[in-house]
Image (cartoon, rainbow, N blue to C red):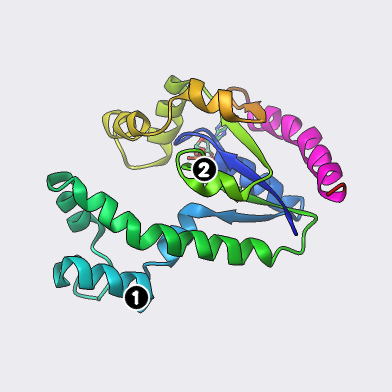
Amino acid sequence: MTYIVGLTGGIGSGKSAASAWFEQQEILVVDADIVAREVVEVGQPALIEIQKHFGDWVLDEQGCLNRSALRDYIFKHPEARQQLEAITHPVIRNSIIQQLNQASSPYAILASPLLLETDQHLLCQRNLLIDVPVELQLVRASQRDDQSREQIKRIIAVQMPRLEKQKRAHDIVDNSGTLEDLYQQLQPLHKHYLQLATSI
Ligand code: ADP
């Protein structure tokens, strides 16, 4: 069994930056956001299921998931979120497990913004939180994306509050400094995870 470390943090906290560092150390990183997109690609069973459940309007002219139409629909029909998640979450979870099982690195990382909000953390032996103040999340995420501060604020509002995440994490990295500061904090954790992975 592979030792799995969950990597989480709010939008713009630095999960991708940390993931890239772990990948440089040749650790397998499975990114839940990427898996969530893969499972609804054209021809995938989950996309066919979504189309059956909601109707043909969920597809655009190319047969791809029309995300903005679905977002609008969920906004007007909040119960639809649960119906959508009932289709996608089990498929995402299975695919994550499959990919983690293929790890040839000493341990593997599951990176997910919703690690603690969903049952994804149950797949992990340990959780690492990338932590920054909300103001810095807003600055970094709005510089990176084409989204306004208001849009980012709305995303932060539906994610688990920072304090709650801090309580649940085994390890916390403060990413309010430079990227170099981030890597310096990741180095001893990586060593620790290598030790933990060999002792299971
Ligand atoms: P997440 O994946 O958690 O949403 P990212 O890793 O994409 O966050 O980081 C958000 C933005 O902030 C990216 O543009 C990234 O390059 C930048 N960033 C991350 N950490 C730092 C840092 N320590 N110093 C400066 N910029 C950073």
* Residue 22 appears anywhere in the view: yes
129 versus 42 height, above or below: above
Residue pictured at 73% horizontal, 35% vertical:
186
Identified at 54% across, 54% down, the residue is 31
Name the residue type under label 2: Leu
Residue 193 image point, x, y percent: 79, 42
- Tell me the distance, in whole angstroms, between the alpha carbons under discs 2 and 1: 26 Å
Does label 1 point to a residue whose CB lies under 8 Å from ligand 1? no
Q: Name the residue under label 2.
A: 115
Q: Quadrant of residue 97?
A: bottom right
Q: Is residue 142 left or right of residue 29?
A: left
> Between residues 99 and 178, which one lies in front from this camera angle?
99
Numbered label tally:
2
Query: Residue 200: percent from the left, percent from the top?
Result: 83, 49
Tell me the residue that label 1 is attached to. 42
Residue 59: tell me if it is visible. Answer: no
* 2 within the magenta span: no
Q: Residues within 10 Å of mark 2 (few under 14, many from 20)?
A: many
- Position of 126 relative to 2 (above/below): above
Q: Is residue 69 left or right of residue 150?
A: left
- At label 1, the amino acid type is Val
Which range of residues does the magenta coloring cover?
178-198
